[in-house]
């Protein structure tokens, strides 16, 4: 395997306006394009390891369509890992321990599922080349932790992962376009990322038709995750020009499409708009940053087991309020992208944007208070202390744990 070190473009370290933009090199978007998964994978290898969700692959009609496409391309495929939820260190360790023996030349990992399945696939693809082969799950456990951000020894992913083809079956996380895999550990009480530019999928096949089987709660949570990612990547401290341009293109479609899709799950135009928004939200967050909603959402997932999209939907209106004083001009830009005849006065347009997002959240019908997702009042302090990390550091308003306690108490 090729070994790739970190590099710095000449002069970039001294240029505050310098930026990078890393996205999947091949993207196939459109209804029916799941039929092209085999073609996309055949450009990258000769045999396939499938990773998916229990409902999105193992027990899903998607499996027949994916396997038929792979067979037409002459690729042998086997399922190597299945997840029933957000991947844990134990899940990744078990998957690595059970991978087929032998050389991995020519192996392509194909991920079919929501963000959790794609994250598990990213971790398998990366660690299959960066860790020894043939260990037991208990031996893999500390080696995985040592490569997660903020825990262990911070060992980088420096060997090229197995090539990955991502096939999302939900419209929200944008995991098909990001460079990280979110891995939790209930035993150690953390949710951290395995991250490297090398982990961006080599190819993405986005077929909006694959989202048609999602239930209403999944559509709502995934959709608000997408919208939260678009908003936070636009206003965050490390916002970049290309991600902001993507947000201005994607957010108006997503804000319009989500209520329509919740009212009519068969609305194919809305399905396509949400899948488009999710893909662009992944590109935006991966090349920019996030904010308070995502920072708290991660900790809430650890404490209460709250699904990520649901937590983002709960926190987004609060994050908009917290950042309103410094992000009004950005809110106004977003409102004018959605409504071309919005007020030319920033304060008025910004208020309209906040009201618009609050209405979308209300239509989604997700929990609106922390107590609704099982947080005990005495755990607010813990939640504030553990909501740090890269997402919170990207928030436009600097928030220390004491300030965050006050914010979280108001919505308990």
Image (cartoon, rainbow, N blue to C red):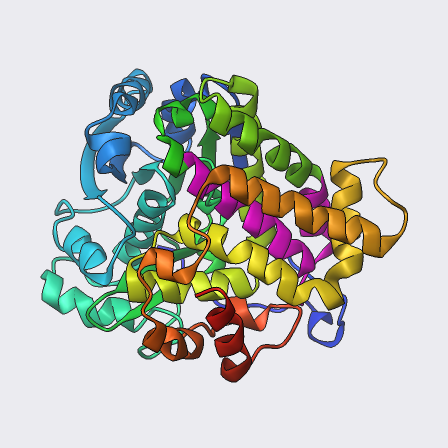
Q: From the viewer's side, name the closer residue of 359 and 233.
A: 359
**Which quadrant: the C terminus?**
bottom left
Q: Which residues are magenta?
A: 219-248
Q: Is residue 210 left or right of residue 393?
A: left
The x and y percentages for residue 46 are 30, 32
Residue 247 on the magenta segment: yes
The x and y percentages for residue 400 are 54, 82
**Which quadrant: the N terminus?**
bottom left
Q: How many numbered marks does the figure carry?
A: 0
Q: For residue 335, which quarter of the picture?
A: top right
Q: For residue 211, which quarter of the picture?
A: top left
| Residue at 54% over, 65% down | 292
Q: From the viewer's side, name the closer residue of 107 and 241.
A: 241
Q: Is residue 40 visible?
A: yes
Q: From the viewer's side, name the closer residue of 288 and 15.
A: 288
| Residue at 12% over, 47% down | 101
| Residue at 75% over, 72% down | 16
Q: Main structural element of the magenta stretch: helix, strand or loop?
A: helix
Q: Is residue 154 visible?
A: no
The x and y percentages for residue 223 are 49, 39
The relative height of residue 379 versus residue 362 in the rendered view (above or below) is below
Q: Is residue 398 left or right of residue 173?
A: right
């Amino acid at each position: 395997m090729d070994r790739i070190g970190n590099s710095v473009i000449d002069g970039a370290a001294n240029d505050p306006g310098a930026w990078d933009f890393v996205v999947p090199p091949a993207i196939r978007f459109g209804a029916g394009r799941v039929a092209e998964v085999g073609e996309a994978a055949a450009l990258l290898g000769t045999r396939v390891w499938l990773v998916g969700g229990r409902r999105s692959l193992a027990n899903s009609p998607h499996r027949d369509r994916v396997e038929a496409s792979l067979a037409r391309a002459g690729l042998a495929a086997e399922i190597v890992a299945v997840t029933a939820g957000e991947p844990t260190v134990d899940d990744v360790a078990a998957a690595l321990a059970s991978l087929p023996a032998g050389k991995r030349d020519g192996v392509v990992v194909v991920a079919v599922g929501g963000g959790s399945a794609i994250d598990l696939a990213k971790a398998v693809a990366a660690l299959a080349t960066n860790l020894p082969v043939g260990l037991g799950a208990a031996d893999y456990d500390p080696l995985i932790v040592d490569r997660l951000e903020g825990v262990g020894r911070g060992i980088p992913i420096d060997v090229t992962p197995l090539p990955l083809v991502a096939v999302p079956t939900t419209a929200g996380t944008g995991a098909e376009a990001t460079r990280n895999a979110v891995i939790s550990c209930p035993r150690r009480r953390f949710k951290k990322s395995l991250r490297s530019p090398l982990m961006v999928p080599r190819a993405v096949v986005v077929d909006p038709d694959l989202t048609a089987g999602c239930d209403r709660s999944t559509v709502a949570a995934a959709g608000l995750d997408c919208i939260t990612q678009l908003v936070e990547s636009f206003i965050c401290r490390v916002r970049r020009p290309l991600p902001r341009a993507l947000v201005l293109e994607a957010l108006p479609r997503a804000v319009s499409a989500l209520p329509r899709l919740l009212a009519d799950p068969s609305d194919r135009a809305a399905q396509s708009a949400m899948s488009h928004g999710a893909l662009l939200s992944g590109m935006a967050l991966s090349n920019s940053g996030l904010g308070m909603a995502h920072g708290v959402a991660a900790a809430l997932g650890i404490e209460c087991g709250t699904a990520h999209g649901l937590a983002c939907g709960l926190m987004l209106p609060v994050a908009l309020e917290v950042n309103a004083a410094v992000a009004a001009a950005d809110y106004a830009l977003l409102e004018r992208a959605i409504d071309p005849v919005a007020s030319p006065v920033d304060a008025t347009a910004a208020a309209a944007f906040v009201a618009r997002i609050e209405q979308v959240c209300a239509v989604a019908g997700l929990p609106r208070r922390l107590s609704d997702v099982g947080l005990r009042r005495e755990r607010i302090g813990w939640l504030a202390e553990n909501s740090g990390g890269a997402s919170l550091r990207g928030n436009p308003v600097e928030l220390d744990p004491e300030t965050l306690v006050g914010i979280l108490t108001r919505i308990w």
